[in-house]
Image: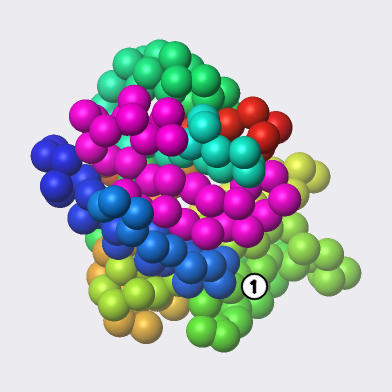
């Protein structure tokens, strides 16, 4: 995949992320920068150009505020070496950028003893609740045009290995399709890749996430 194609997908994904979290973004010298506005992460640079990793890492490393850098890449070891050489600390070296057509996404019913709650305001929110009202699993999906970006997919430790992640994803996908979405995009941890793979999501590329010393 070319850097231009990857940049387009990253742009589409980030629009869903900022919609889901209520954030803003801008372009600085052509670089995509998201204003995260958290105590340990003020800004996050997103890079898809393999030739721009070292320079952008140097910019992030030189800032005095806590800033992060996310690099979409098929060469994570090379990126890790480059950002560390610039003075950054790699926080997450092995996440995965994924996508899927949502029209035929599998939808699973909750197991006995659980119920689903769906909200739209306008971000789609799904919660899987126990009979006592305890939140067992949850997730968000922001629809921007024909794209839907999954965000904060979580299952509580006590309720894992019961298929609740599949319930959340299927319910989100169905609601997103009802909202006009056709393509799903997400970033996944190593553990999440197995779930999404079983649901038919495909890998686009890897992701290396690093921070400067102020973001510790």
Q: Measuring 64% from the left and 28% from the top, which residue is drawn there? A: 213
Q: Is residue 136 above or below residue 65?
A: below
Q: Secondary structure at mark 1?
A: strand
Q: Would residue 69 be visible to someone looking at this image?
A: yes
What x and y, as percent, mark residue 141?
A: 48, 68
For this view, does 7 lie left or right of residue 19? Answer: left
Q: Measuring 77% from the left and 63% from the top, which residue is drawn there? A: 135
For this view, does 11 lie left or right of residue 95? Answer: left
- Decide whether residue 71 is among the magenta residues: no
Q: Measuring 42% from the left and 54% from the top, which residue is drawn there? A: 33
What x and y, as percent, mark residue 178?
A: 36, 83
Of all residues, the one furthest to the right in this rendering is 132
> Mark 1 highlights which residue?
116
Q: Quadrant of the C terminus?
A: top right
| Figure quadrant of residue 106 | bottom left
- Decide whether residue 33 is among the magenta residues: yes
What x and y, as percent, mark residue 34?
A: 47, 57
Q: Measuring 37% from the left and 83% from the top, which residue is drawn there? A: 179
Q: Camera-side residue: 90 or 54?
A: 54
Q: Is residue 216 above or below residue 162?
A: above
For this view, does 170 lie left or right of residue 66? Answer: left
Please report the bounds of the magenta region as a residue range.
31-59
Q: Camera-side residue: 142 or 88?
A: 88
């Amino acid at each position: 995949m070319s850097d231009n194609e990857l940049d387009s997908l990253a742009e589409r994904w980030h629009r869903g992320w900022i919609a889901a979290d209520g954030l803003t973004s801008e372009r600085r010298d052509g670089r995509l920068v998201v204003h995260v506005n958290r105590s340990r992460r003020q800004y996050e640079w997103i890079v898809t150009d393999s030739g721009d990793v070292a320079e952008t890492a140097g910019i992030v490393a030189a800032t005095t505020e806590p800033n992060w850098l996310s690099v979409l890449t098929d060469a994570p070891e090379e990126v890790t070496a480059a950002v560390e050489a610039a003075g950054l600390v790699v926080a997450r070296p092995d996440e995965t950028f994924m996508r899927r057509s949502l029209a035929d996404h599998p939808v699973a019913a909750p197991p006995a003893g659980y119920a689903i709650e769906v909200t739209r305001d306008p971000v789609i929110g799904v919660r899987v609740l126990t009979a006592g009202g305890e939140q067992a699993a949850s997730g968000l999906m922001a629809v921007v045009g024909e794209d839907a970006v999954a965000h904060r997919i979580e299952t509580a430790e006590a309720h894992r290995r019961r298929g609740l992640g599949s319930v959340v994803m299927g319910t989100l996908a169905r609601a997103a399709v009802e909202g006009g979405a056709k393509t799903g995009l997400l970033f996944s941890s190593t553990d999440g890749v197995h779930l999404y793979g079983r649901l038919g999501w495909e890998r686009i590329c890897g992701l290396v996430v690093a921070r400067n010393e102020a973001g510790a």
